[in-house]
């Protein structure tokens, strides 16, 4: 809704003149009011949004090196801090041994039917 209503050109959250971004303090106030309105009791800051952005990229399959570039980190170790947040992709990993065992079970079932 925000994007459709305000149609930002360069910055997602533009200042009053449309040429500069919102000030840090203004963003902090907007986040603070949104957290209060949503009745969120955990500590939420604009930096929390950055963590969420990186986490969603990771969950969506984006390579951590691209995320490093997007976040402007010079050291990959800084970006890797975000990887501890998500277990989504980790749970989807199937080890080669698991694949072998799965294939063996499937083949055994086929042999039983024949």
Image: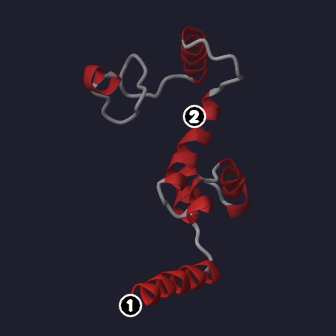
Count neighbours of disc 1 (C-alpha within 10 A) and say few if under 14, some if 14 to 19, many if 20 or more: few
For marks 1 and 2, the one nearer the N-term is: 2
Nearest the camera: 46 or 103?
103
Q: Disc 1 on helix, strand or loop?
A: loop
Which residue is pictured at 42% across the width and 85% down the height?
110
Camera-side residue: 95 or 45? 95
Residue at the image point whose x is 46% and y is 86% from the top: 112
53 over 75 or under it: above or below: above
Percent across and percent down for residue 103 are 51, 84
Image x and y of residue 97, in percent: 64, 83
Numbered badge on residue 7: none
Residues at badges 1 and 2 in contact (C-beta under 8 Å)?
no
Q: Residues under labels 1 and 2: Cα distance?
A: 56 Å
Which quarter of the rendering shows the C terminus? bottom left
- The residue under the point 71% across, 23% down is 43
Toward which corner of the image does residue 2 lie, by quadrant?
A: top left
Is 25 placed left or right of 70 in the picture?
right
Tell me, for residue 49, which label it has, or none.
2
């Amino acid at each position: 809704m925000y994007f459709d209503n305000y149609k930002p050109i360069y910055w997602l959250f533009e200042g009053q003149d449309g040429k500069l971004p919102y000030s840090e303090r203004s963003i902090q106030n907007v986040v603070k009011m949104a957290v209060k309105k949503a009745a969120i009791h955990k500590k939420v800051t604009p930096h929390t949004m950055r963590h969420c952005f990186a986490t969603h990229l990771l969950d969506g399959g984006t390579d951590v090196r691209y995320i490093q570039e997007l976040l402007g980190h010079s050291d990959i170790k800084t970006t890797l801090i975000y990887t501890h947040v998500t277990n989504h992709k980790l749970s989807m990993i199937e080890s080669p041994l698991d694949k072998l065992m799965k294939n063996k079970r499937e083949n055994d079932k086929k042999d039983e039917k024949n």
